[in-house]
Amino acid sequence: MIGMEYKSREWAKRHAWRVAPEQARAIQEELRKEWEGADRLPELRTVAGLDAAFVLRGSQALKNRRGRWNALREANRAIGCVVMYRFPEMEEVERASAVVPLQFPYIPGLLSFREIPALLAALRKLRKLPDLLFCDGQGYAHPRRFGLACHLGVLLDRPTIGCAKSLLVGTHGELGEKAGSWAPIVDGRAKGERIGAVVRTRKGVRPIYVSQGHRVSLETAVRLTLQVADGVRIPRPTREADAFASERKQRFLREHV
DNA sequence: GCGACAG
DNA sequence: ATCTTGTCGC
C-alpha cells in the first residue's frame, strides 16, 4: 500500500475477495500483522461514516406487482456508501456510493469479505479520502482481533474505528446510565483481554460497541465516537451512511424492477 | 455435541 | 442485513 497511488488500478487491492471461508480466515491472520493499535492520526480535517445495503436474490423487493420475479433475481448486489464531513464542524462535504456484485455470504467473523469490496468501490469515487473512517461493525472486538474496521484500515493505511450495534464476542460489566459513560469489553477466553468498549451515546437507550479499527487507541476511539455522536444512539457518520445506503437501495430497486 | 454468532 | 404494519410510549 505504501506509495500506492490513490485511484490507481491496484488501489487497496491486497488480496482476492472471492475466497473460501478457510482462506478468508488465513488472510485475516496475515493482514493482522500490519495492524496498529496505538494512536497514529494526522490532524483530523475530515471524517466519514461507512455502511452497506444489499439486494438479495429472491427477495420480495425484486418481484413486480404481478408477483413475478424480475430478471435481476440472480443478481445479488452490495451497495457501499460513504458520507464525509469536515471535522470538527461536522458539516457534510461529500458522499459517494457504488453497487457491486455480492460474492460472499454472511458468516460471523467474516463480514469484511461481504462488505469491504462495496465500501472500497464507494471510497474510490471520493475526490479525497477522509482522515478517519467510522465503520458499521466491529474492529478489534473480533474472534481473531481483525474485524471489518481493522481490515479496511489496514488496506487503506488509514485510521478507522468500529461502531457496532451489537456484540460479536466478549462481555462487559454494568454500564452507567448517563450519556458518555462507557465500560470495557473483555474476552474471557483470552485472559480477559480488553478488546473494546460498550458506550452509552444517549441516556435511556441501548449502548453501542466501540472498538479500535486501525492506528487508533481504544481511549481515542471512544472519545472520537462520542465527539461525533449527536444525541442519537447511533453516531452521525455511521447513521447517515446507513440512511444513504437505504436511499440508494430504493433507487436501485426503482430503476431495475 | 450444544450454543453463540458484527451485518 | 432483509422482510413487514401497525402500534405503544415519551
Image (cartoon, coloured by chain):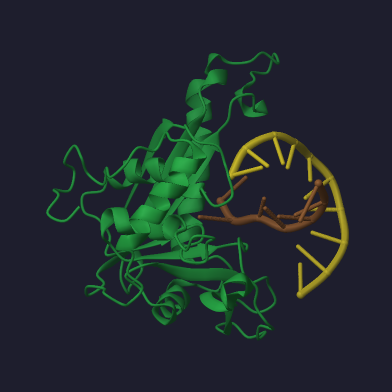
Chain colours: A green, B brown, C yellow
Q: Is residue A66 above or below residue A134?
A: above
Q: Is residue A172 above or below residue C7?
A: below
User: Residue A223: image x %, image y %?
Assistant: 43, 80
On screen, residue A26 versus residue A210, left or right, reads left
User: Residue A243: image x %, image y %?
Assistant: 51, 50
Say which residue appears at 51% left-offset and 70% top-offset. Answer: A210
Query: Between residues A230 and A190, which one lies in front from this camera angle?
Result: A190
Q: Is residue A47 visible?
A: yes
Say which residue appears at 17% left-offset and 48% top-offset. Answer: A6
Query: Between residues A257 and A214, which one lies in front from this camera angle?
Result: A214
Q: Is residue A125 visible?
A: no
Query: Between residues A125 and A109, which one lies in front from this camera angle?
Result: A109
Say which residue appears at 58% left-offset and 76% top-offset. Answer: A185
Count the marks: 0
In the rendered image, the quadrant that contains the C terminus of chain A is top right
Q: In the figure, residue A212 lies in which quadrant?
A: bottom left
User: Residue A116: image x %, image y %?
Assistant: 41, 46
Query: Between residues A234 and A27, which one lies in front from this camera angle?
Result: A27
Q: In the figure, residue A232 lies in which quadrant?
A: bottom right
